[in-house]
Image (cartoon, coloured by chain):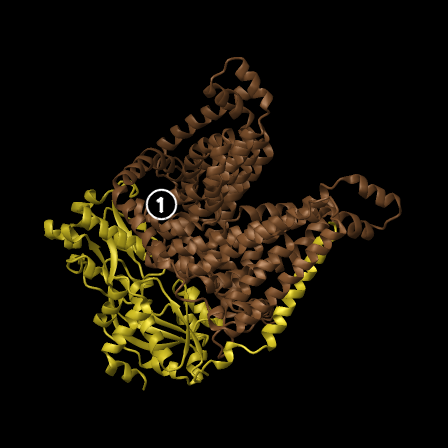
Amino acid sequence: MPHLKKSQLLIGGALVWIFLSRLFQDDHTLELSTSENTGFTTAVGDAAASIRGNRTKSAAFIYLFNPIRATINGFVEAIRTLISVPRGNAIIPLIGWFGVAAIVAFTVYATSRLRTALLATSLLLACGALGMWQFTMDTFAMTFASVLLSLLIGIPMGIWAGLSDRVLKILTPFLDLAQILPTLVYLAPLALFFLIGTASATIATMVYSIPISIRITSHAIRNLNQSPIEAAVSMGSTGKQTLSKVQLPMAKQMIVLGINQTVMAALSFVVIAALIGAPGLGKPVVDALIIRNVGQGFVAGFAVVFVAILLDRSTSAAAKAQEGFIPPTPAQIRNSRIKLGLAGIATIISIFASRTVLSLAVWPSSINISSQVENVTNSATKWITTNLYIFTVGFKDFISNWVLNPLETLLAFSPWYVTLTAIVFLALVIGGNRVAILVTVLLSLIVLSGLWHEAMITLTQTIVATLLTMTIGIALGILVGRNESAERILRPFLDAGQTLPAFVYLIPMLGLFGPTRFTAIATGIVYSIPVVVKIVGEGIRAVPASMIEAATAAGSTVRQIITKVQLPAAKKSILLATNQGMIFVLAVVVIGGFVGSGGLGYLVILGGSKPELQGKGLVAGFVILLLGVTIDRIAQASARRV
Amino acid sequence: MKFSLGRRSAAASLVVAGALVLAGCSSSVNDSADSASDCGTWAIAMHAWNGYTASAQVVAEVAKANGCTITQTTLEEAGVTYDAMEAGSIDLIIEDWGGGRWQEWVDRGAVLEAGDNGNVGLIGMYVAPWMAAEYPDILDSANLNKYADMFKTADSGGKGAWYEGPPGYTTIGEKMIAANKLNFKAIATGSEAALVDVLTKAEANKTPALAYFYTPGTLFIKIPGLEQSRIKFPANDWSDAAEASGLTDYPETQLQKLMSKKLMDSGSIFATIVMNFKWTNADQNSVAADIEGGMEPAAAAQKWIDANPDTVAGWLG
């Protein structure tokens, strides 16, 4: 029974760890005062300062970074002039709101069907009604530009990785890394080279979305039915012919699905991008955080959700439209052509109208429900924060005193070598030699960076948030997995929760829990629950019905079925969900630096605004990455070993 | 069906292309737009605190009335914004508290100092006013340790909680705690929102709190007695936070205006307005209070402009 042994080892290890930690508490914690630099962070800071100083002089800037920046800026600005910002002395952009709505309706109609087109158009108009038209158009422009550029790079690379094992092997570590990396982390390094503004934001978005496009494209190519390809090869097709005539057409649906995922990834960046001066819906969200206007944050947040649903539904509908195998009759083709033609003419007329009639060009200010939405959310939040404050503070204090503080003492206030050894031991038991070696290297790098203590503070918060997320997430996941109507009810909330920017509810969380570590934890929980519920729910649903029937026939109660059959069978999904949840939590816990959670996230933010601490901030960003990989590797190993 | 998407996408592209052509050459409502004056388009950096919004909005409204096109971009302070000025995407910081942290950018000619804005800033550590009333001697920094236990929270590691200012602000809390041997722990609050939250709740619920705050600010209007609840540390002896020993208090600071080289060289009326802009803490507070009270920033600024035509006329040179 190797399984039993493993758990005994883990418990034994934990006891030794706690004992050693008590014995040597507060020794060698590597604590560093916030304003203090180490030799290393000073050196990084100096390097950053010299990069800044060379922006106008060095060849790398003149011939590489500056032209890239100018090109991307120009591209995004061109799209904005078209739909968002008036050019020169004009008072409207080239196409007014009515024209844009018509183009969206037509494009969605042409690529999928009427119902989706109507949905997309109403969502777009809802953004207008929220008073967010121009911000929405800016977000469209940013998303369009970054998705287009991402696909230009991602699809060819994905095809290459799909055809060549070697390329895939080289790319995989980078793809993994990009998915672990919390978005807050790479803003500062990018801004160093591409300065603040649209270009940096676009490139940051691309860093996030290109890996997804590569991954899905290569996956699509790799998982094709092999027989048509073999047939083509045996009939003498060249590699190029096979690719363009057989593989790509067959993989088309998956690739379009990849476009969908790329769009969603780009969109999830919209708020973070505003932190480095990108135009779009992120701007009012960040403004709202600054002036503590919860309502304004939610109004903009809703617009983000609407845009997300719009883009998600229309791109996934386009992917679905490729599924059909029944060839249409000539009459049907003629019919659909006529409809399409009429719709096209109507669109052109609408565009023309949006340029000649002022009320169709500029969103009419009379159609604006933003202040009502603002008031409702503000008073709801106010009621919650004043009336539930006592409970929330009680809960916060309970978790802080009984979970957060003891764990923090164990991880961050023990000697670094005790904590490091303990984590490596954990990795060894769970994942074996290779994982243990990797974890040793990663943790040693964190020690060398000088930010060990802060890293352990962040790790503590991540673990506590993940524990709470899993407790709630598994419960909801079971509910969703067992009960279809519960799934139908929860689904929209889960979808919205996945797209609503975490910044939006950072402020209400602040109201509920004050500037504490728990505010960051609570935000992380809300952000990561949807993904956990979805994965666990799917796992529960995938448990074969025959197993459950057998258990029922044997007289098991519902509780027994859940605990003895469904949960063990879904163990892999639960571990996978834990892994995903932790990565999501980490991404948000570092944002908690904005509301008093301290740790690495705070250092990243601090580095952005205090020039003398810029080096420390950059190093902190890198340490977050190291920490993310450590967590991911251990969690993945435990999922693999099931 | 196989080719259907291709044809449909082709049709879609055709319409979009048609739209672009239309957009390019057809007549439009734009033709009837007024032609703006030659002031140009300028970008103001918007920082996190309410007083800043007040100053920036007033400058923006005055500039717009004089034919300028003004954009406002929310940005973190200092490095990020100086970089943006160097990149040409920001032209003005209307209120900067950092004594000379911009020197590196000034040396490169990327950022220019445009003088005092008339506001005087004073940072300090404040207790909730009810505490100052109940324990009058708490306002002397020497007595803080006596009360440290009261300030303990679940997050302060067994010491008193010392709520420190946001990242971009001038903060020397850790040094003050160390130098004065205070039994407190600096807790990073991350944003002005958090500080306001701490002090407001503490006063409302009569719970203890010690937090960083600063004048000018509208919180002093909302929490009566807060201004008198400032902890007195030994008299200040520094101006550059990096060189502060931590033993002494924060200094009074003349808040600065910074502008981009592009703006300075343009000779635009906006450059003149910025150079001449100067007002008092009371002025800023009145506009900021209106904004806090729910008025749109632009409306609050306009209200002040209408009430102070002479001051505004003076800025126009």
Left or right of A612, for residue A235: right
Q: Residue at x 59, y 65 (%)?
A: A347
The residue wearing badge 1 is A519
Locate residue A173: give its quadrant: top right
Q: Is residue A515 visible?
A: yes
Nearer the observer, A7 or A319? A319
Disc 1, SS: helix
Q: Colour of chain A?
A: brown
Tell me residue A118's x, y (percent): 55, 54
What is the three-letter code of the residue carrying label 1? Thr
Chain painted yellow: B
Q: Label 1: chain?
A: A
When asked about the image quadrant of residue A290, the answer is: bottom left
**Residue B210, can we see it?**
no
- A375 to the left or right of B34: left
Give the camera-side residue of A302 and A173. Answer: A302
Compared to residue A633, the image places residue A272 above or below, namely: below
Q: Which image quadrant is residue B215 in?
A: bottom left
